Image (tube, rainbow, N blue to C red):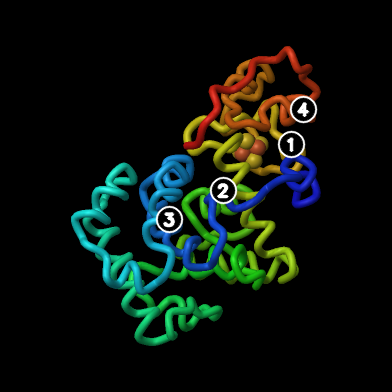
Amino acid sequence: MLRALAAAYPDAHCELDFSTPLELAVATILSAQCTDKRVNEVTPALFARYPTALDYAKADRAELEELIRPTGFFRNKATSLIGLGAAVVERHDGVLPATLDELVKLPGIGRKTANVILGNAFGIPGITVDTHFGRLVRRWGWTDEQDPVKVEQAVGELVPKRDWTMVSHYVIFHGRRVCHARKPACGVCTLAADCPAFGTGPTDPEQAAALVKGPEAAHLLALAGLGAAATEGPGGEE
Ligand code: SF4
């Protein structure tokens, strides 16, 4: 299944734009209950205005809230960002730490966010269990666990550590583009032969093709044996 996912998503990556660990931490906090696309629209101005942890610590709350308002829950998120900046300055001399234990003690950073930061900003393997990841690995029978920490541990035992970050990207990409919560595109799914949940969504290729989202739709449909003329999905994220 991993080989098939790797062929389907050769460019799988963290879909949040960032250039430093702090920027990724900020973007990940903003991504709660919000699409990565919308976060990426907000962060260029935000990162330019607040380049360091100290800048967040000293931020004018009203100005910060206004900048991040489009991502929703902006008051809570502003509290997290100001608290994050202050804690990073006080505890870590302004530098985001590179361990799970230290990251999860920072305001606004839970285990999922910490693993995103470790895997993508520090190159330390981490499994990111978001809603897509949990739903898909249970569908596939990789684990029955519901608790994200237990899901992380169970998948960590199945997959070599060096692959943890990429597995997270593959599974999340597949959840956003093909294996949707309510109507997965089973009829054009690259995992159809191996998936115990095949048939949860339409198995007719033409019907399923219309459900595929995202910029890789043509590539995914070609892998499923449908030509480039097949219906392209509407794009975007769930
Ligand atoms: S076959 Fe269906 S349920 Fe299984 S991974 Fe593919 S889209 Fe998801």
According to the picture, the residue beneath numbered tag 4 turns out to be 224
In the rendered view, tell whether residue 238 sits above or below residue 3: above
Judged from the image, the secondary structure of the residue bearing numbered disc 1 is: loop
**Whole-percent x, y for residue 105 in the image:** 39, 80
- Is there a contact, CB below 8 Å, between mark 3 and mark 2? no
The numbered mark, 1 or 4, whose residue comes first in the sequence reads 1
Badge 3: residue crowd in 10 Å (few <14, some 14–19, many ≥20): few
Ligand 1 contact, mark 1 (Cβ < 8 Å): yes
Numbered disc 2: secondary structure: loop
Q: Amino acid at mark 3?
A: Ala
Mark nearer the viewer, 3 or 1: 3
Residue 159 is drawn in which quadrant? bottom right
Residue bearing the label numbered 3: 48
Q: Residue at 69%, 57% (x, y): give it.
A: 166
Q: Which residue is mark 1?
A: 190
> Does any atom of ligand 1 lie closer than 8 Å to the CB of label 3?
no
Is label 2 or label 1 in front?
2
Q: Position of residue 219 (x, y in %)?
A: 74, 29
Q: Which residue corresponds to the image point at 54% horizontal and 51% vertical from the top-left? A: 17
Residue 1 at x, y percent in the picture = 75, 49
Please tell me which residue lies in front, 15 or 150.
Answer: 15
